[in-house]
Amino acid sequence: MKKLIILMLVVLAICTAEATAQSYRIIVNESNTVSSISQKELAMVFLKKRKKWDDGTNIMPVDQKANAKVRETFSMEVFKKKVAAIRSYWQKAMFSGMAAGPDEKNSDLDVIEYVKHNKGAIGYISSTAPLNGVKVISVKE
């Protein structure tokens, strides 16, 4: 019994470590010269408070659908808020005449296609998604 408990604790520790590893990647169009972004800048981009890349290109953030696991993780790590809180922010912004939130796509592949075909686009995808025609950038603390 004692061995079983120890084994279960080891498995739990391994699963927890894997779950806390970054489970998403930030992607931009291949022509984008950006190689990294701070977490604060990333939040500003997805809240549309930063509107242009350094070269003057309009930034086009793209979200995953609201119930996507990757979006949950992204929202908690970048905004320190649940998806519902971010959606509420955008609803209030729309009703007060401000901009609408980022476009939402149904899957990693849809986000990749959007980013691939839009020079200023930035999105996030699951860490296991294929990288076809997009560039991964790092996130600095």
Image (cartoon, rainbow, N blue to C red):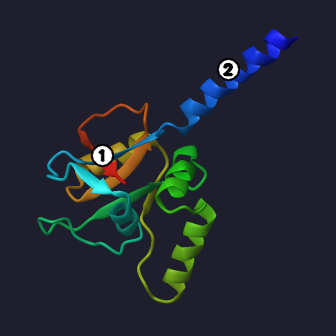
Q: Residue at x 69, y 26 (%)?
A: 12
Furthest-bottom residue in this view: 96
* In this rendering, position of residue 133 left or right of residue 64: left
Q: Which mark is residue 76?
A: none
Seen from the viewer's position, the closer of residues 6 and 17 is: 6
The residue singled out by tag 1 in the image is: 138
Q: Residue 133 falls in which quadrant of the image?
A: top left
Seen from the viewer's position, the closer of residues 118 and 15 is: 15
Disc 1 is placed on an element classified as: strand
In the rendered view of the protein, which quadrant contains the N terminus? Answer: top right
x then y, percent, for residue 24: 44, 42
In the rendered view of the protein, which quadrant contains the C terminus? Answer: bottom left
x then y, percent, for residue 59: 26, 65
Q: Residue at x 42, y 65 (%)?
A: 102
* In this rendering, position of residue 104 left or right of residue 132: right
x then y, percent, for residue 21: 49, 36
- Precedes in sequence: disc 1 or disc 2: 2
Q: Amino acid at mark 2?
A: Val
The residue singled out by tag 2 in the image is: 10
Furthest-left residue in this view: 55
Q: Residue at x 37, y 64 (%)?
A: 40
**Tags 1 and 2 touching, CB below 8 Å:** no
Q: Amino acid at mark 1?
A: Ser
* In this rendering, position of residue 28 left or right of residue 17: left
x then y, percent, for residue 120: 23, 59
Q: Residue at x 63, y 64 (%)?
A: 84
Task: From this view, report whether residue 65 is shown above or below residue 10.
Answer: below
Report the Cα–Cα distance between label 1 and label 2. 30 Å
- Badge 2 crowding class, 10 Å Cα cut-off, few under 14, some 14 to 19, many 20 or more, is few
Name the front one of labels 1 and 2.
2
